[in-house]
Image (cartoon, rainbow, N blue to C red):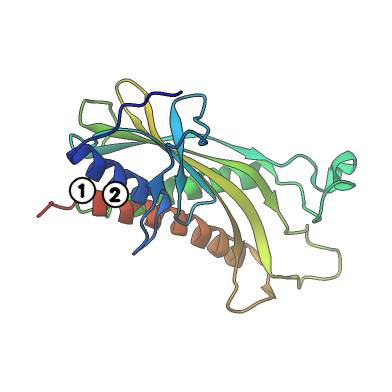
Amino acid sequence: MRLKNRPRGGQVTMMAAALALMAGCAGSSPTLDTTDEAEMSYDGLYPVKGGTADQAWAREGVDLSQYSKIMLQGVGIEYRPGGETGRLYRANSRDDHYEISASQKERLKELVRSTFLEELGRSKHFTIVNEPGPDVLQIRGGLLDVVSYVPPDPIGRTEIYLSRVGEATLVLEIRDSVTDAVFVRAVDRRAAEDTARGFVESNRVQNRSEVRRMVQVWARLLRERLDTFGAPKE
């Protein structure tokens, strides 16, 4: 039989806020699954039930009320192997995807960084800092399995129409900046696509706009949850 220390009083409220921060949406009530059937992660997190992220986990009994600052840390971007030169991988791929150049990778890295900084800089309750501290939450994020569906420009033809530019999986964690202990982890996969207009002409400006839109969704959700968590309690 597994024994657990159950959170009490304010800890329940603060944990609920943390769950909503990473996994929830307006009006939702994510809950932490600490039943005997729930599988605890290797680093002590329990699954979160409910919310908009594909998967989420959180630590039981955490009190986050001491934090008023956030520190961003990128942990890298990983790309799906293959593309136009990876013939060994394409046989097992459901979609044709294309090689991403070094310059494209650098532009994506800068776009993700600037978008999160810009959006989180609008927070009403948390200040962005560059150094760890006892009142600082570390927001650690990385992109995994990034794919591009944009083919290289064909000779003699300049018009290419796509329903989606690419897709990626975001892994986002909230940690204590001093101890590096992880409090919440969320995993979410999204496509950079214009669902309202269907197929649209592909060009550098349009493609960047769609990718930025995808990243903005992640950044805005995080900022909104942070502000909800940091709002003065009645």
Where 154 sits versus 117, above or below? Answer: below
Under circle 1, the secondary element is helix
Which image quadrant for residue 201?
bottom right
Above or below, comparing residue 130 to residue 27 in the picture: above
Left or right of 27: which side holds 165?
right
Of residues 16 and 225, the one nearer the viewer is: 16
Does residue 58 lie above or below 150 as drawn?
above
Quarter of the figure with the C terminus = bottom left
Whole-angstrom CA distance, mark 1 to mark 2, is 6 Å
Do labels 1 and 2 touch, CB within 8 Å? yes
Q: Quadrant of residue 191?
A: bottom right
Q: Is residue 184 left or right of residue 9?
A: right
The numbered dot on residue 18 is: none
The residue beneath circle 2 is 226
The reply to whether residue 127 is in sight is: no
Dividing the picture into quadrants, the one containing residue 24 is bottom left
Residue 203, given in percent of the width and then of the height, sits at 66, 66
Write the residue at 58% across / 42% down. 106
Say what amino acid the circle numbered 2 marks.
Answer: Leu
Say which residue appears at 42% left-offset and 50% top-offset.
23
Q: Nearer the viewer, residue 166 or 153?
A: 166
Q: Does residue 8 appear left or right of residue 51 in this picture?
A: left
Residue 164 % position (x, y): 67, 65
Q: Which residue is mark 1?
A: 230
